[in-house]
Amino acid sequence: MRGRKARKTAKNAHIAKNYNIVNIPIYSINTMMIERDLQAQIGQMLAANSAVVLIGPRQIGKTTLALNLAEEGRAIYRDLERPREAEQVRDVELFEQQYPSELIILDEVQRLPEIFAPLRGIIDRRRRRGQRVGQFLFLGSASLDLLRQTSESLAGRIAYAELAGVNMLEAEVASIPERKLWLRGGFPDSLLATSDKASLQWRADLIRSYLERDVPQFGFRVPAETLRRFWTMLAHHQGGLLNAASLAKGLGISGQSVARYLDILVDLLLVRRLMPWHSNHGKRLVKSPKIYVRDSGLLHALLDIGTHDQLLGHPVVGFSWEGFVIENLITSTSGLGYQPYFYRTQAGAEIDLVLVRGGQPEVAIEIKRASAPKAEKGLHIACEDLGIHHKYVVYAGEESYLQGQNTWAVSAQTLMRVLAERRDLSFAE
């Protein structure tokens, strides 16, 4: 164990020395214990674009991933949450002149939105000098504002990616049991904690940090306790349709405040607002979105669920599993052109997750935690409505088998591989 720690320290010192990573304690630049699939994709994006924006919640592993990429070539890193480093970068043109050929990595870049306007000229100047790709890597913890800032000034010069929590396939490679990932969620520090108790405490601290520090720093003026109650209410209604009136009544706030609070949690990549798919066949459709706390570990922390036994005995267990699987499947389709939706009619036809590409629903997924699942009649009716031929029931088992009517029962990991590898979705070999 002592030798392993020494090797880590030596590697971290090498990164700090060779890539001018300053004001970062060496002990915080750790070797990745869980290999993230997105790292190779970000490397490819940098090889094809002048700039890349990587977004994701706090503590999800963006900085670690970026520093691992930095080890592969000349790079300069600055954390814009640190006042001194933010001041160094504030005049970004002067800062760039000091590092004219390095990959510049700026963390928490939404802190300095004013730097985006001059970046267009900087990128074009570097292009004229022959450096057409791999100029900037921006890391951010909020989505909408960050994307809006970059898209307006850097259109055609920038690519985007989102780092989600550790997924089932990454955990499988790292020999982490699925039940552990489900309970603790995909934040690496939570997942790799020494015990379930330590993991729960880490997640409770992260929630407190978001409410008391991060939300105000992002410029949102919201009482921390009210936002906590709102977030907890969403956790109790995991996977349910948004009922703004009920939430407003329960919290004693207006419907406009409910919409605003939800926007905050969605923008911070903590809650998913899964929209319904609308088609033009005249059916009476549910039009309210479904709401999920995106990370299963944060969901369980909000509900004070600390062990697997407590989770199995909690009323939220089925919807927790559903949200867990949905997040993993959406992660596996990132970059493939799919957009996620659900589908439900007033008559009861329903699909838990619809993957739409090019405006056409292609894949229908029903999620069940049972070990011997059976597709509901409503799934087949809904697929007939939408003209979907690829139907899957994702369940907690490992075998893949045909249930009839072109419907396959599969594990989440199997379907993730099929989607990511663009294999024949019919499973016909």
Image: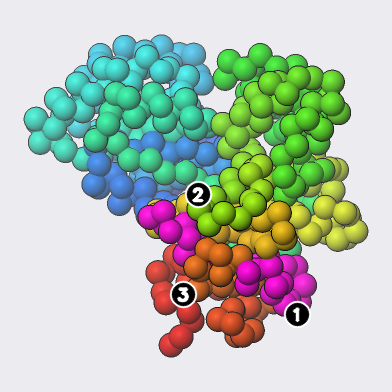
Question: In the rendered image of this protein, does residue 160 appear above or below residue 22?
Answer: below
Residue at image point 71% right, 54% down: 346
Residues marked 1 and 3 touching at CB (< 8 Å): no
Residue placed under numbered mark 2 in the picture = 31
Q: Left or right of 218: which side holds 337?
A: left
Query: How far apart in space, not on screen, are marks 1 and 3 (Cα)?
Result: 21 Å
Res. 372 mark: 1
Give the residue at x 61% y 65%: 382
Residue 21: x and y, percent? 40, 31
Please state which amino acid type lies under the numbered disc 1: Ala
Q: Secondary structure at mark 3?
A: loop
Where is residue 115, by image quadrant?
top left
Q: Which residues are magenta?
A: 355-381
Q: Around disc 3, counting alpha carbons within 10 Å, would you say few (fewer than 14), some (14 to 19), or many (20 or more)?
A: some
Q: Is residue 422 visible?
A: yes
Q: Tell me the tag on residue 297.
A: none
Residue 168 at x, y = what percent?
A: 60, 62
Q: How is the image coloured?
A: rainbow
Residue that extends furthest to the front in the rendered view of this protein: 282
Q: Quadrant location of residue 148?
A: top left
Quarter of the image containing the N terminus? bottom right
Which residue was labeled with disc 3?
Answer: 425
3D distance between C-alphas at marks 3 and 2 = 36 Å
Q: Position of residue 127 (x, y in %)?
A: 13, 32
